[in-house]
Image: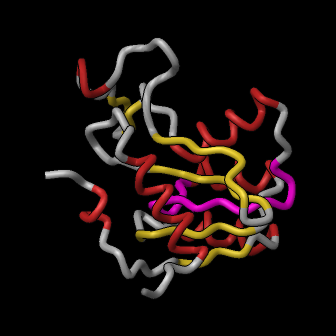
Amino acid sequence: MERISWNEYFMAQSQLLALRSTCTRLAVGATIVRDKRIIAGGYNGSISGGVHCIDEGCYVIDGHCVRTIHAEMNALLQCSKFGVPTDGAEMYVTHFPCLHCCRSIIQSGIKKIYYGEDYKNHPYSIEQFKDAGVIVEKVEMKIPPSAFIST
């Protein structure tokens, strides 16, 4: 039996986290890793104790759900809450990060982003990652995301 790569392993963790998403528009998961150890994970959903999109629908303003905290932000905030440094870490996210998450990732000191699927890859995000020296790499999975969904 051939083992999956580290990139596939951590991306699979992000795909599992995405299954916890409470957003009906897009399920996203993010895993922060340092030295091949998971230090945090997040998925897109409402604030703790808040109303969820799956219960009352998305709260959309200017085409964006303002009820949802993105997976990348939830993972970064988990590190902040528990005093876990992110400087020099890597992030695995199921979808290419949005502009807002891009800036937060850069400010947090994350040095490498692995993503699973292209999703509105904004040219300015790509430029900002490049200017900040953040390496961005797409991970091709041998195991399809549907393998994580029970039927």
Q: Is residue 45 left or right of residue 103?
A: left
Q: Which of 104 and 11 is in front in this view?
A: 11
> x, y percentage for residue 137?
60, 78
**Is residue 95 highlighted in magenta?**
yes
Extreme residue toward the bottom, this view = 2
Horizontal and vertical percent for residue 113? Answer: 65, 67
**In the figure, 77 relative to 30: above or below?**
above
Image point (50%, 79%), residue name? 4
Q: Which of the 4 quarters of the picture holds residue 74?
A: top right
Q: Is residue 16 left or right of residue 81?
A: left
Q: Residue furthest left?
A: 151
Question: x, y (%) of residue 55?
Answer: 24, 20
Is residue 27 highlighted in magenta? no
In the picture shown, does residue 118 fall above or below 88? below
Q: Residue at x 45, y 47 (%)?
A: 17
Tell me if 123 is positioned left or right of 113 in this view: left
Which residue is at 43% across, 32% downward?
45
Does residue 43 appear to the left or right of 65 in the view shown? right
Q: What stretch is highlighted in magenta?
A: 86-98
Q: Quadrant of the N terminus?
A: bottom left
Q: Residue at x 42, y 63 (%)?
A: 120
Q: Which of 13 and 61 is in front in this view?
A: 13
| Colour mode of the rendering | secondary structure
Q: Residue 149: which quarter of the image?
A: bottom left
Q: Where is residue 25 in the image (x, y as percent from the top left)?
A: 28, 43
Count every numbered label the image shows and give the total. 0
